[in-house]
Image (cartoon, rainbow, N blue to C red):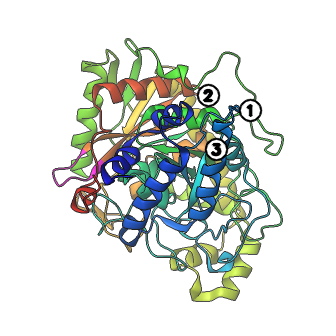
Amino acid sequence: MTNEFSNELCSMDAVALAALIRSREVSALEVTDAVLSRMQMLEPELHAFCTPTPDLARAAAKQVDKHLGSGEVVGPLAGVPWGCKDLICTAGVKTASGSVAYADFVPDEDDVVVERMRDAGAILLGKTNVPEFGYSGVGHNNVFETTRNPWNTNLTSGGSSAGSGAAVASGMGPFAIGSDGGGSVRIPSSICGLYGMKASMGRVPLYPGVKDERLPGVSSWEALEHIGPMSRTVADSALMLSVIAGPDSRDNRSIPHERGFDWMASLRGDIKGLRVAYSPDLGYARVDPRVRDIVARAVRVFERDLGCIVEEANPGWENPYDAFWALLAGDSDLKGMRAMEAKLGDRMTPHLREFLRTEWTAEQLTDAVMTRKAVNNKMWRFMRKYDLFLTPTLAVPPFEVGIQGPSNIDGFDVEPFEWLHFTYPLNFTGQPAASIPAGWTDDGLPVGLQIIGRHLDDATVLRASACFEAAQPWKHRWPPLLAAMGIA
């Protein structure tokens, strides 16, 4: 296989690859080898995959080619490579969750979404890096090398789906799975110049990673967590959702199929005449001026090019930052994790140790529940007036590795996680929300726009995303690192 052909395969989206493999114009093994070759070149720089599985990937690709050669029916993702976040269980493949405590843990069953991806014929490339148990918006832990941003390797790729973001942005697979308990699909999508969607709560079932009592100490953010796709095109995320979404009895929060709902069909049509609200700061967030400018220009596309009726408005809730952390505490296995912290000490990451040592009062935990209810009530009333709600995905562009977040935004001192003000409220409400590339800073760093839909209205979020992508495409943009290494 020539380098040119290999690079061409790595630059293709999942929709195109699936069609080419099914028609046998290219083999699943050729695609897998191309991506594995790119991984071999890029991983020393990016550290996106904490546990790569090249041998398993090649064996699975050969099986796909065998089935196609014998005329058997194959799944919709047959031969398409993908990466899986290391918080999501994979039978027979290590799931370390970024923790020393689970450095050698090998699950004996797949998560529901992994099971569905395998059944669809997708080729698992390996596990992608995360912060310890996902309790961060960046990608460093005490087990693996820190994941770097392909757009600038001195900077973070975001988190907690850190490796998934870096992998897809650099062409190590057309898409990857992430999970999102406070923004962890949308954060790295914004920081890495990708599309990432948190579908409505219950669309994609969760098991066993958030519920299995056999995994003591593992976070169980059952009330906040979503699993979703990260990709370089909107259509690829829709394609993945068509495979991983749908009810499952192992998740009592999963919702039934809606009659007539079709993820791929949702991409079609326009959004002319939709009522769209836009908030640059939710009324309280400090926002980097570069983000404000880029997102404001992206919002104008909805009015000028897409025919929407746009007005600036805020839902009106008070800053729920403290409530978010209390909700995490109430939804975590504090007893198990505190015992783990007492045993591991400084082998756990400092910010997680600090969180676990916090003494939460009953009033703090119940106040957080009441705050969540207040945010929900403000939001449904607000969304009665609008079809879509637009915000920045994050308050800042990508920042340096090794920190949890900037200490100053637009001249104001902030807490380390306050750059996340736009993402976690949507985990309170469970609404569909996507991050889409809004543009790039003057020094070439991606900035995301968040597109939020009404309760269960995933279809409109996807349609709006596809319309924006058509009006302001980004698929052609690749990190300069690839050209510098001769693989663009």
Residue 80 in picture, x, y percent from top left: 54, 44
Residue 50 position, x and y percent, is 53, 69
Name above or below for residue 483 compared with residue 451: below
Disc 3 from disc 2: Cα separation: 35 Å
- Location of mark 1 (residue): 255
Q: Is residue 38 above or below residue 28?
A: below
Q: Upstream in the sequence, badge 2 or badge 1?
A: 1
How many numbered marks, from 0 up?
3
What kind of residue is marked 1?
Ile
Marks 2 and 1 close (CB-CB < 8 Å)? yes
Residue 120's disc is: none
In the displayed image of the protein, which residue is found farthest to the top? 273
- Residue 283: say if magenta: no
SS at badge 3: helix
**Which residue does the numbered mark 2 point to in the structure image?**
456
User: Label 1's element?
Assistant: loop
Q: Which mark is first along the chain, 2 or 3?
A: 3
Label 2 – label 1 distance at C-alpha? 10 Å
Residue furthest to the front in view is 70
**Residue, disc 3:** 64
Residue 296 locus on image (x, y percent): 25, 35
Q: Which residues are magenta?
A: 440-446
Q: Is residue 253 left or right of residue 313?
A: right
Q: Amino acid at mark 2?
A: Leu
User: Which quadrant holds residue 228?
Assistant: top right
Question: As shown in the figure, which amino acid type bears the numbered disc 3?
Answer: Val
The residue located at (62%, 68%) in the rendering is 97
The residue lying toward the viewer, choosing from 16 and 209, is 16
- Tell me if residue 80 comes above or below residue 357 in the rendering: above
Q: Main secondary structure of the magenta part?
A: loop
- The residues tagged by marks 1 and 3 sit, at their Cα atoms, a distance apart of 31 Å
